[in-house]
Structure formats: C-alpha cells, structure tokens
C-alpha cells in the first residue's frame, strides 16, 4: 500500500551514491517507475536489482531485462509534509504533490502516516480542505454521467443503519441517478459493501458500473474496486495503526469521492452520540459547516442531517442479518424493522426535495409511495441481477445455515440502555464482517417493556468456537440494561 521497493547490493549501491531509503527511478523497455531502494549484503548479486512480487506482477518485468537506475532528489511531497508538521499552511501545489506521490507509490506507509498526523499539528484551514479534496479527486478516475446525479453518505459509527441499500432503489425509481460506492467495515461488524455482497458481488470495474447505471440508474459497489480518489484508500490503510481518524480527513475522504463521481446533490447523515464518530453537537455543527463550505466550492448542493444516536438502526448487526433487514423493508415483510424504513424514507425524501424531484415537504410521501408500490424492490432486483446475484432471493434465505443461540430477559422491566460498542465487539467476536452469517439480531428496542424469559437478542455464527467465544464475552459485558418494574 506504500511505495514500491527494490533491493540493491549494499556495497555497489553506495558506490553510486544511493542511500538506504532513497527514491530511485527505474527505466526499462520504454517504461519507468519510482521505488524505494533498500540494501542487502547477500540476496542480490553485483549488477542486479532485486524486485518484489508486486512489481513483477504489475509491470511484467522479465529476468534479464536491462534496467537503468537513477537517484531522485527528495520529493517535494516530503518537504510539504515536514512543512505541515511544523505548523505551516500548505498551498494547492504542495497538497497535490503529496497526493500525487501517494497515488504513484513514492511515499512509504510511515511517510503517509506522518502526513495524517500532520493535521494534528495545526488543523486544516477551509482552503487546505478544498485543496486536499481537489487533489484527491483529480488524481484518479472520474465519473461523467448524464442526468441528475445524487448521493447520500453517512459518516458511520452507528450499528445497522443500512439506509443506503433502501434509498438507492427508491431514488433510482424516481428517475434520479445514484452511483453508490460504499466502504467495507474497518472496525465495525459490517459496511454497506459487506452487506450488499451477501446479495451480489460488489467488486466491479468502472465500465461495468457505467453499464449498471445506464440500465438501472444506480449501483451498489465497493469503492475500493473503483479508482475514484485512490489516494484515500492508501491513506486509510496507512493510518489504521494510529487508531484515530481526524475529522478533517473523514470530511475530505467523503467529499473527494463525491467530486470524482460527479455528484451534484448530496445528503449527509450525521449521527451524534457519546460513542459515535461525532460525540456532541458542538463538533457536529463544525463538521456540518466544513461539509457545506467544501460543497459550495465544488458546486454540490448539500444538506447535512444531524440526528441523535442512542441505539442501532434496524434489528440485525452483521452482513447477512443487515441484508435481511434491507430485504424485509424492500419486500414489505411483516417483520421489517420500522425504524430502518422510516429513516431511509426520510433521507430519500430529503434528497428528492434537494434535487428538485419533489416539492418542499412532499419528498417523504413520494419516497414512501415508491417503496409501498414495489417499484423500489423491482429496482433492487434488477440491480442484484446486473451485479451477478440471485434476484429471486427472499429475506429469510440469507441467514440459512447459521448457528443460533437465543438469550432471554432475566427479569421484568424496561430497556433503558443498549450498548452499541458492546454490540460491535460481540458481533466481531462472532466473526463479522468476514463471516457473513455472523452477527446479532435484536428482539427488543430502547424503551420496550420486557417480561422475564422474553427473548432479547439472538447470536448468529458460522462455527461453534466463535459462538463459545462470544458467550464467554457476554459474561463480562451487557448489551441491554433493563430496569426492573412490577407487572400485575
């Protein structure tokens, strides 16, 4: 994910003025690449250059090819990163040099990490956020689509919350175009891409995505398979060991992909809560201001919807269980999670109004009508088929084969607290997101009355070892807090 690496004989490299870690340019058969040079005293013979597998596979270099090697000066990007670490404001040229070198793999993972950390030295100005977004959008592929192109994005942190998968077919059925590229889970039990993958493949080239949109006005694909703002994925992977994601970086990550995708109307879902990415309203208002400031620079009409997050959205946590929730909503199932339906319809209504498809105040009614009529499910069926899945799948089929264990209330009472963090931890112990059937189904919601021996949640796993691990963890943590009451 960082720079390409080549290996040189140490004694020979020093004769040519190459220091360990220097960036060198290799040329062969009218091709060239930049790589980091490191030394060995035995693995490479004099006159040879050792290449790692990623270079062999990508560039089809043959044993015996003649390579020209030239030492490059310190990249401008390194100078710019140092400047930012010292607290200086960066220009567009400096910001673009950093992003260009990340895309070209001239920077190592540690150097990218320094770049991420530099935003803590002095927060980015609005101008720097614009420069960074512009540079990231311009150094990858761009989508140019006919028609009115719209999107919705959640900043994440809230379990369940698969509103995008309900919204996309509603919006497409209205006639608007929604090219939804989504992420996989990093620290949560499921991302939108993980959940959609239960229904159909999500890794598709840009040419296929254009076909999906041409035939069905929408897609639901993994953003990592598309070269939109490619620097972003490398920055995310390099910053994972830090265990933090600066809010400015999150904003730029979202907006650069929207710019590259040609989005003109955008709704941002901003859940706020003590355990969310956005912990309080003060930070939420500042994040909203920055989203709107960047959007204005790119001519994207954006609305940020701030909501209090006290519990997961939907009943299922984990890829297959969340896919079941989505299908139940789209198929009008009697057991559909009403909160997921309501939130999806509300967000879709806001987007329909923002894009001028519905009059002010009538967007939700339009979205609900599309959902209730079955038009949204028809769009999703077609999308599943286009992306290579089984369009006839029914909601309850996606969890077949799972090992299940149900847990019951120990007393009468009222559900006063649901621990979102504990839910995420237990779901991941069960194997989510890699094991698609793993997760938790919630039978009760915040404020629900419960009687002793009522089912409160069910664990799903693909192996008994995973189930045992989760059961042990539940001895030390509580997903639900029930306050006792008396029932007559």
Image (cartoon, rainbow, N blue to C red):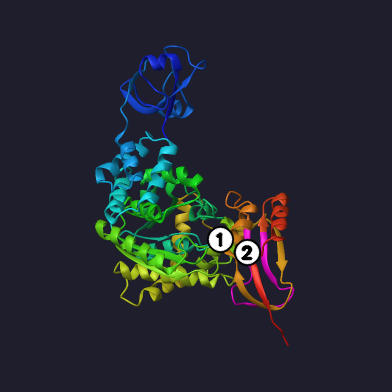
| Residue named by callout 2 | 441
The answer to whether residue 450 is seen in the rendering is no
**Tally of numbered tags:** 2
Q: Is residue 185 visible?
A: yes
Label 1 CA crowd tier, 10 Å (few <14, some 14–19, many 20+): many
Q: Is residue 248 above or below residue 480?
A: above
Taking the image as shown, residue 336 lies to the left or right of residue 212, namely right
Cα distance in 3D space between marks 2 and 1 = 9 Å
Indicate whether 111 appears above or below 247. Answer: above
Q: Nearer the viewer, residue 227 or 252?
A: 252
Image quadrant where one finds the N terminus: top left
Whichever of labels 2 and 1 marks the residue nearer the N terminus, that label is 1
Quarter containing the C terminus: bottom right
Question: Residue 320 vs residue 168: left or right?
Answer: right
Res 22 → quadrant: top left
Please name the residue that numbered disc 1 is placed on.
322
As drawn, which residue projects farthest toward the bottom? 488
| Residue 105 place in picture, x, y as percent | 38, 35
Using residue 28 as the reference point, say whether residue 160 is left or right of it: right
State yes or no: residue 444 in magenta: yes
Q: Is residue 281 magenta?
A: no
Expressed as whole percent of the image width and height from the top left, the position of residue 178 reads 37, 58
Q: Residues within 10 Å of mark 2 (few under 14, many from 20)?
A: many
Q: Residue at x 46, y 67 (%)?
A: 272
| Residue 114 percent location from the top left of the image | 41, 42
Q: Position of residue 479 (x, y in %)?
A: 64, 65
Task: Name which residue lies at 40% across and 76% down.
Answer: 365
Q: Which residues are magenta?
A: 439-459
Q: Quick one: SS at disc 2? A: strand
Which residue shows up at 57% across the image and 52% down it?
433
Q: Nearer the viewer, residue 130 or 243?
A: 243
């Amino acid at each position: 994910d960082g720079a390409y690496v080549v290996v040189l004989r140490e004694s020979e490299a020093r004769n040519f003025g190459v220091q360990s870690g220097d960036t060198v340019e290799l040329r062969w058969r009218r091709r060239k690449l930049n790589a980091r040079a490191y030394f060995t005293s035995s693995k490479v013979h004099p006159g040879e250059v050792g290449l790692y597998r990623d270079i062999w596979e990508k560039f089809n270099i043959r044993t015996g090819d003649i390579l020209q090697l030239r030492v490059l000066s310190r990249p401008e990007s390194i100078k710019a990163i140092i400047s930012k670490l010292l607290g200086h404001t960066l220009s567009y040229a400096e910001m673009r040099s950093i992003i260009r070198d990340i895309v070209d793999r001239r920077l190592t993972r540690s150097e990218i990490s320094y770049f991420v950390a530099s935003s803590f030295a002095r927060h980015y100005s609005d101008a720097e956020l614009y420069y960074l977004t512009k540079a990231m959008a311009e150094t990858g592929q761009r989508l140019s689509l006919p028609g009115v192109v719209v999107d919705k994005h959640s900043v994440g942190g809230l379990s369940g919350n698969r509103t995008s998968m309900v919204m996309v077919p509603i919006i497409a059925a209205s006639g608007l175009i929604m090219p939804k590229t989504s992420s996989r889970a990093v620290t949560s039990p499921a991302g939108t891409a993980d959940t959609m993958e239960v229904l159909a493949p999500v890794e598709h080239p840009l040419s296929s995505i254009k076909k999906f949109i041409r035939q069905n006005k929408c897609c639901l694909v993994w953003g990592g398979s598309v070269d939109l703002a490619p620097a972003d994925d490398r920055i995310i992977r390099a910053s994972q060991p830090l265990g933090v994601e600066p809010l400015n970086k999150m904003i730029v990550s979202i907006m650069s992909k929207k710019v590259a995708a040609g989005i003109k109307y955008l709704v941002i879902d901003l859940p706020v809560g003590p355990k969310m990415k956005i912990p309080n309203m003060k930070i939420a208002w500042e994040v909203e201001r920055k989203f709107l400031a960047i959007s204005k620079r790119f001519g994207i009409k954006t609305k940020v919807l701030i909501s209090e997050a006290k519990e997961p959205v939907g009943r299922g946590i984990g890829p297959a269980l969340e896919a079941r929730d989505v299908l139940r909503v789209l198929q009008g199932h009697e057991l559909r999670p009403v909160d997921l339906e309501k939130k999806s319809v509300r967000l879709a209504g806001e987007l329909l109004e923002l894009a001028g498809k519905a009059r002010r105040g009538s967007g939700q009614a339009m979205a609900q009508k599309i959902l209730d009529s079955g038009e949204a499910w028809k769009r999703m069926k077609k999308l599943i088929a286009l992306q290579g899945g089984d369009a006839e799948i029914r909601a309850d089929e996606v969890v077949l084969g799972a090992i299940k264990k149900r847990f019951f209330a120990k007393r009468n009472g009222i559900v006063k607290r649901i621990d979102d963090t504990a839910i995420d931890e237990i779901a991941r112990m069960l194997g989510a997101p890699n094991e698609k059937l793993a997760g938790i189904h919630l039978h009760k919601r915040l404020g629900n009355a419960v009687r002793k021996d009522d089912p409160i949640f069910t664990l799903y796993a693909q192996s008994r070892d995973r189930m045992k691990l989760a059961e042990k963890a539940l001895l030390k943590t509580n997903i639900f807090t029930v306050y006792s009451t008396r029932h007559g």
